[in-house]
Image (cartoon, rainbow, N blue to C red):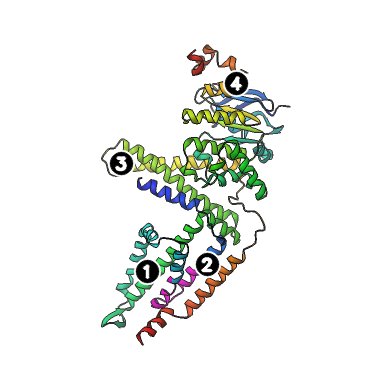
Amino acid sequence: MDRLQEAIAALHAVDARRSESRIDPAARLIVCMAFSLTTVSFGKYDFCGLMGMSLFLVITAIWENISVWKGLCRLRYILAAVALLGSANLFYDRNVIFYLGGLPVTGGLLSALTLCSKGIFTVLAAYFLLYLIGMPGICRALRRLGIPGGAVTVLLLTWRYLIVLLKEVRRMWQAYGMRAPGQRGVRMRAWGSFAGLLLLRSMDRAETVYQSMLLRGYDGEALREPAGRAASGRSILYVAAWLCVFIFLRWIPLFRLAGRLFLS
Amino acid sequence: MSVIKAEHLTFSYDGAEEVLSDVSFALEPEETVGLIGANGVGKSTLLKILVGLLPGYRGTVEVGGLTVDKKHIRQIRELAGYVFQDSDSQLFLSTVYEDVAFGPRNYGYAEAEVDRRVMDALRQVHMEGLRDRQIYRMSGGQKKLASIATILSMEPQIILLDEPSGALDPRNRKNLIRVIREMKGTKIIASHDLDMVWDTCERTLLLSGGRLIRDGRTKEILADEALLQTHGLELPLSLSHG
């Protein structure tokens, strides 16, 4: 399977994902947002405090049987970008904050570690959310949380367009490759027409998909749910429990306390 | 009363060249009609006009007694379902169930009713076992049947099929013919597959150059080799081999 096909299959898999647990997608979205907000709220030198937030990721990964390694592999480019951004701090902040076994730990190093961890944690949390409820689940959750239908529909259709676009790229790539054996990538000279044609073809395809939606009663609301569905007790408990944990971790530096306990 | 009526229907995409020119016909309830013609004669255009996808036509077009215009578009689309030539365009949700349920949900049916309609539609195309199948994992034949199910779940009185047998292997094609025969309601099948039209339609409309050349019994039109050849078609294989 080529890389494009792999990407299309991954997008489809996320699109088809349905949560089999009884926890409402909206509850998962709230918890994910609360996690991300709490994570980014830590100070730039509060690396120890931040590490406590990894509990959520660890527990979710174990509980839901998600492979963190696979996630990290899939997100490698985003994570590399996060690491690159974080590493800039190394050069700006050279004040020594403390010594670790005789080695000086600068503010830049600490803030770079904190920034990278924040990035990794939030990206992983978003990946877990996508893995658990899929893109339609996220859109449904947004609707349940009162986000206007139009905005959610735009998000969902953009996602779908991405799939259509990738499929067209693959078709054109294959057609090009068949007539350009041994050539790596598309020649610079052909890029203009390749990109232009890709845009036209994908727009054409998207137009047909849109017509198909219109013919089946689509009126701007892509996700219709049975009205009046109340949140389950389990979902409420899930949100309440995690919110308590986040508040606790935000104010109590769990890892620092544990470290002191072992060192004393 | 005619369930579909077109009188002096004329249409052009750019206001210059007419794709359809002075086309008139009427269909009775429960009729199955073949719409044949060479490439580019306006078969798909005609079907799209009937479901209101192409406004700006001249003449009169009525579906279920309602004029095809902006005012009646929602009712017309509930009355008439259109199956696209390319199943990948018809199916845009992740699983078969979700896609087949899309229409009934949009029309505001309760979830129990949506479920009943979806299962009925899947039963009609013999796909009950594939309700949770991811669409991108399906074969071309399965996709075609699933796209028909997306229309059947809306329980339309009229079904318009655009090149339904395109890119299907013989077994899937045979299966599709069986499904089309079993489907209730008025059907228009736009196709180059004259053998399929022969097998499924009692009446045929022959389009050529945007004009309705002949409207009559399928057995007569498809057996008329001179007529077919004049308008860029060939005898059905089942007839040409004696």
Measured along the vertical axis of the image, is residue A251 above or below residue B176?
below
CB under 8 Å between discs 4 and 1? no
State the separation of the CA atoms marked 2 and 4.
60 Å
Q: How many labels does the image show?
A: 4
Measured along the vertical axis of the image, is residue A162 above or below residue B43?
below
Look at discs 4 and 3 and give the one toward the viewer. Answer: 4
Q: Mark 2 lies on which chain?
A: A
Look at discs 2 and 1 and give the one toward the viewer. Answer: 2
Q: Which mark is residue A189?
A: 3
Residue B234 at x, y percent in the picture:
49, 17
- Residue under circle 1? A116
The residue at 70%/32% (across/down) is B64
| Number of residues whose C-alpha sits closer than 10 Å to that of mark 4, classed few (under 14), some (14–19) or many (20 or more) | many
| Number of residues whose C-alpha sits closer than 10 Å to that of mark 3, classed few (under 14), some (14–19) or many (20 or more) | few
- Residue under circle 2? A31
Q: Is the magenta stretch mostly helix, strand or loop?
A: helix
Disc 1 marks which amino acid?
A: Cys
Residue A96 at x, y percent in the picture:
30, 81
